[in-house]
Image (cartoon, rainbow, N blue to C red):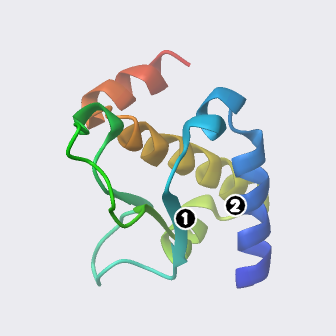
Amino acid sequence: MTKEQFEEIVRDSLKQLPKILRDKLINVELVIEDSPIPQESLLGLYQGVPLKKRGVWYGNVLPDKITLFKINIENFGKTEQGIKKIIYDVLLHEIGHYFGFGEEELRTMNDDK
């Protein structure tokens, strides 16, 4: 899949996220990289200060960053439909970290789907 096709799926996935989540994403950069450091199987990564942990001191900071790892997502997704599903799920997961949810909370939420 070309980088442009992958980016288009990411844009479409962002549009499909619930509006309440999209509206609350402030100062977040979305980045697509081919892969994380060698031997890592990460699909996505959130870097920043979660909303729950921000205090009055928080300001004048670089954007939080959500990175999607294209090659790993493609390897797991195999087909275009599989890739679309994984991109959506990974975006939702990493945005969950932005809102301050930990891994266990996100797994529980995912199990409830």
Give the vertical position of 56 relative to 43 (above or below). Answer: above
Q: Position of residue 48 (x, y in %)?
A: 31, 56
Q: Is residue 1 visible?
A: no
Asked whether 13 or 39 is in front, the reply is: 13
Asked whether 76 or 58 is in front, the reply is: 58
Taking the spot 51% from the left edge, 64% from the top edge, the residue there is: 29
Taking the spot 23% from the left edge, 38% from the top edge, the residue there is: 56
Q: Position of residue 80 (x, y in %)?
A: 77, 62
Element carrying mark 2: helix
Q: Position of residue 50 (x, y in %)?
A: 31, 42
Q: Furthest-top residue in view?
A: 112
**How many residues crowd around disc 1 within 10 Å: few (fewer than 14), some, or many (20 or more)?**
few
Numbered label attached to residue 30: 1
Taking the spot 65% from the left edge, 65% from the top edge, the residue there is: 78
Element carrying mark 1: strand
Q: Contact, CB < 8 Å: mark 1 with mark 2?
A: yes
Asked whether, in this view, residue 88 is left or right of residue 90, the answer is right
Numbered label attached to residue 10: 2
Q: Is residue 41 visible?
A: yes
Front label number (1 vs 2): 1
